[in-house]
Image: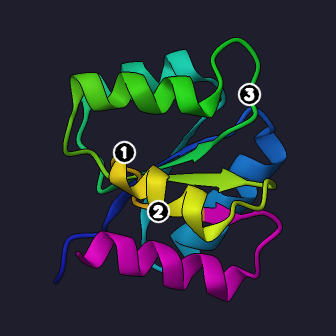
Amino acid sequence: MEKKKKILIVDDEPSIAKTVKFILDADGFQSETVFCGDDCLEKINESEYDLVLLDIMMPKMNGWQVFEEIKKVKPGQKVAFLTVIKYSDTVRAKLEREGLSACISKPFENEDLVKRVSAITSN
């Protein structure tokens, strides 16, 4: 049996984080949720994840700041932003050059979320 892909979901809105977890777990992923950047950084230092799904707009430490810290402590870590912000193709390309795996727009269809996460974690 194939090992389940391990996903860390980081969103300051517990209802969103728990919904994403429910969707991914129902499709065979193993996911965990945290609600702030500090907890995210603590988790990635304790464990290995196939992907970190990271909300951009969070208090205290925003998603971009968390992403920068992740790059320092785990340079190869795959990270995708969960965002309501619509980025242009130019901005997305710049983010990918910075090491971001993807930007997933909120709101999303369940099937689209699973497809994107599957594609990112299969590479």
Pick the front one: 67 or 47: 67
What residue do we see at 67% from left, 39% from top?
56
Residue 106 colored in magenta in the image? yes
Magenta-tinted stretch: 104-123
- Mark 2 lies on residue: 93
Is residue 75 depicted above or below 101 in this figure? above
| Secondary element at tag 2 | helix
What residue do we see at 33% from left, 49% from top?
99
Q: Is 83 on the left or on the right of 61, as rendered?
A: right
Amino acid type for the residue under numbered disc 3 = Met
Is residue 92 depicted above or below 76 in this figure? below
Outermost residue, top direction? 60
Amino acid type for the residue under numbered disc 1 = Glu
| Secondary element at tag 1 | loop
Q: Which mark is residue 58?
A: 3
Q: CA distance from mark 3 to mark 1?
A: 20 Å
Q: Main secondary structure of the magenta part?
A: helix
Disc 2 crowd, CA 10 A, few/some/many (<14, 14-19, 20+): some
Disc 3 crowd, CA 10 A, few/some/many (<14, 14-19, 20+): some
Q: Is 13 on the left or on the right of 53, as rendered?
A: right
- Mark 1 lies on residue: 98
Disc 1 crowd, CA 10 A, few/some/many (<14, 14-19, 20+): few
Could you tell which of marks 1 and 2 lies nearer the N-terminus? 2
Could you tell which of marks 3 and 1 lies nearer the N-terminus? 3
Q: Nearer the viewer, mark 3 or mark 1?
A: 1
Q: CA distance from mark 3 to mark 2?
A: 23 Å
Q: CA distance from mark 1 to mark 2?
A: 9 Å
Q: Quadrant location of the C terminus?
A: bottom left
Pick the front one: 73 or 16: 73
